[in-house]
Image: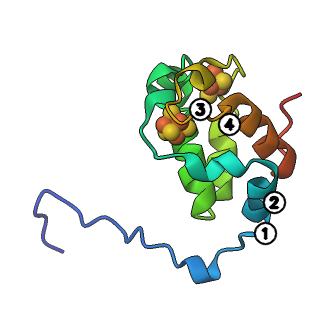
Amino acid sequence: MMNFGFKIAPSATINLDNVDMEKFTLLHEMEPDVYKCMACGSCSATCPAGRFTGMSVRKVILDLQRGREKEAVRMLKGCMLCGKCSMVCPRGINTRHLILSVCRIYNEDKQ
Ligand code: SF4
Ligand code: SF4
């Protein structure tokens, strides 16, 4: 194959018809604010763990909405539950509480 110095990235398309949204529906019932997120990234910019672990509440919410549970749960391992993200969210989402609910529903031990 010719080497052009770049590669074509694999398709990132997600067919939401094939995604099991049962857990996300449960999360929405427990945390209605999850749909308030506008993906502004303020939480990620403030997160002290983000720089070292890649933790990002914004990405966790987006991944869960897209059925990418494994990626979201893996990211949550870096969270220290400090609550800084809750203080800066312009939509007033209690992100710390949301993280705990996500851990409860997706069986990630954080207690
Ligand atoms: S700060 Fe709030 S609105 Fe912005 S991405 Fe984070 S959770 Fe969503
Ligand atoms: S609670 Fe978790 S996600 Fe939020 S700022 Fe602290 S370490 Fe980051």
78 w.r.t. 16: above or below: above
Residue receiving disc 4: 76
Residue receiving disc 1: 22
Q: Which residue is at 77% across, 54% downward?
A: 27
Whether pointer 1 and pointer 4 mark residues with C-beta atoms closer than 8 Å, the reply is: no
| View extreme (bottom): residue | 17
Tag 4 secondary structure: helix
Whether pointer 2 and pointer 1 mark residues with C-beta atoms closer than 8 Å, the reply is: yes
Tag 1 secondary structure: helix
Amino acid type indicated by mark 1? Glu
Amino acid type indicated by mark 4? Leu
For the residues marked 2 and 1, what is the alpha-carbon distance in whole angstroms? Answer: 6 Å
Residue 90 position, x and y percent, is 49, 31
For the residues marked 3 and 2, what is the alpha-carbon distance in whole angstroms? Answer: 21 Å
Q: Earlier in the sequence, mark 1 or mark 4?
A: 1
| View extreme (right): residue | 111
Whether pointer 4 and pointer 3 mark residues with C-beta atoms closer than 8 Å, the reply is: no
Residue receiving disc 3: 92
Q: Which of marks 3 and 1 is nearer the N terminus?
A: 1
